[in-house]
Every structure is written in structure tokens, then in C-alpha cells.
Amino acid sequence: MKRNLLLGFLAFATLATQALAQTPEWIWHQNNGKAPGTNERRFFRKVFKVDGKVQKATLGASVDDEGTVFVNAKSVGTIVSWDQPVSIDVTAELVAGDNVLGIRGLNHGSAAGAVARLDITYADGKKTSVGTDTSWLAHNEDVVGWQQLAFKTEGWTKPASVARLGAAPWGDVLSGGGAKIGKAGAPTKPGATAKREATPAEAIYTLPDFKVELIHSSETAEEGTWVAMCKDSQGRLIVSPQFGRGAEGGLLRVTLGADGKVAKREVL
């Protein structure tokens, strides 16, 4: 009886350890032991293997305070606040063999961290996940191509583990507290879906012979105010939203339809 109890306890302890090991960690650059600084940008990446046909892959991520997440060098989600995580269907972004996850983080001050969990379900029913932990690599400079799989990581170091997902001060921010799953490149966030009406066109003062038309009101908190805009060679609008989205690799590309309204909106 004692032997059976001992074996049962060991099995339980093993399962508990495995569950604990699968819990993502909030990570940040080690900063040589110094506290995170104000307006500090840090970069994180993780190479992982896809072994089989993927049926569904969902990526959840958050950054304190702002960030961008990448899958195989493609920007798939923009985070504007740690309490507004992204949850993104990235099934189409994964390839057989090696893949790479990337996170660009910006800290405004005080606590800093980045957390992510990629849940993969294979066609044969097998499930696996990739979460942030100290097996990732971190860097303090925005080196060209760092999001790419073939990038050479000389000078990159292991990140510091700040806290496990669920711990203070952030709590279990990836638990699905209202985050809506969107397609890669068009993330949606809890508390950011309410449409905010723009200033009425008739309320804007213009010079004689100029006309103002309202074509779009901000649909998410990530847009805020459009602070710069130009056209590309195909007549689409390239927009830099508020909150530094342009500097963070999150420009918007807006295609107008024949009626002059927004027909398509993409995060670059």
C-alpha cells in the first residue's frame, strides 16, 4: 500500500511539474541586472519545430506596455496595453519544420515584461504549446532581420524571467478575458472594439473650395488618431496611427472602395 501511495504521489508530482513547466513566463532583457528603463525597447525570439499537419494554431500575447508579435518575420499582432492581449489565429503562418516567434516590446516605465503562448493542434489530435521562458533569446537593439528564421543570433542572451503567467502584477492576462480571436495581421482586443466617432466633417474649418468627407472612424484603441498619411503606387492610403504604431512596425494600409469608404484595412 505504501509503495502504491508513493508511486501515485510521484506520478502526481511529475504531472504537476509538467503543468508548471508549460506555464508561460513574463520575460524581459536582463539589462545587466538593472531595472527596466523608461521608453526601453527590447526584442525576443524563439525557434520551434512544427512536426506534422497543423489543424489549428492560436497565438496569445501581451507586453507591458506596448509591443508587436511576429511569426516567421510577419507582423501578426499589435499590443497597445498589457491588459489588452492579442489572440490570433496563425494557422496559415506556420510551416513544416523550423519556425520562429518574435516579440518587440516597449516599456514606458516601471514594470516591464512580455508573455506569449502558441497553442498548436495537429490533424492527428496531438496538441503542443510554445510559451515564453528563459529558453528564448533577448536583445537590446533593433537589428535588421532579427525576426527571420535564418538570422544569426550572436550577441543575443537568455532573458530574465520576471514572473509566471498568473502572478502579480499582471494576473492571468491570457486566460481569455474577453480577447477575441482575429486573423493574423488584424488582431482584436478586449475593450478596444467600441467604435469611436471621428469629428463630424461639417465641424472642420477649411479654406474656400476645399471639401472634407468622413471616410472612417477609428474602430480600435490601437488606431487612436491618424497622425500621418500618404498614398502608395496603387492609390492605397498608408497611415501612421497614434501611440507610435509607425515606429513599432504597425503602419496601416487602407484601401478605399468605389464609394470612397474603407473597403480593406491591413496592419503592416
Image (cartoon, rainbow, N blue to C red):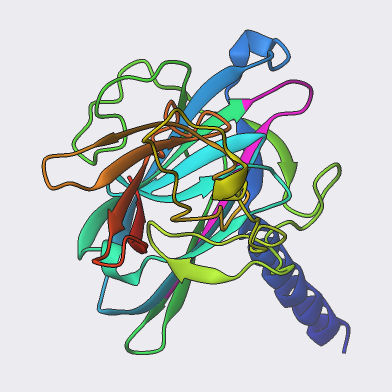
Determine the residue positioned at 49% across, 59% down. 187
Pick the quarter of the image with the N terminus.
bottom right
Q: Is residue 155 above or below residue 2?
A: above
Any part of residue 132 in sight: no
Magenta stretch bounds: 107-120
Q: Residue furthest left?
A: 233
Q: Is residue 159 left or right of residue 100?
A: right
Determine the residue positioned at 36% across, 35% down. 209
Residue 232 percent across, percent down from the top left: 18, 39
Q: Residue furthest front?
A: 208
Magenta span dominant secondary structure? strand
Residue 14 percent across, percent down from the top left: 68, 68
Count numbered badges in the picture.
0
Determine the residue positioned at 42% across, 16% down. 141
Q: Is residue 164 left or right of residue 199?
A: right
Any part of residue 209 in sight: yes
Q: Is residue 67 above or below residue 98?
A: above
Pick the quarter of the image with the C terminus.
top left
Along the line of sight, the residue nearer the viewer: 17 or 262: 262
Residue 102 percent across, percent down from the top left: 40, 41
Determine the residue positioned at 41% across, 89% down. 125
Q: Is residue 216 left or right of residue 266?
A: right
Along the line of sight, the residue nearer the viewer: 4 or 197: 197
Q: Is residue 165 above or below residue 211?
A: below
Give the image quarter of residue 96: bottom left
Along the line of sight, the residue nearer the viewer: 26 or 186: 186
- Magenta-span inclusion, residue 210: no
Residue 173 percent across, percent down from the top left: 73, 56
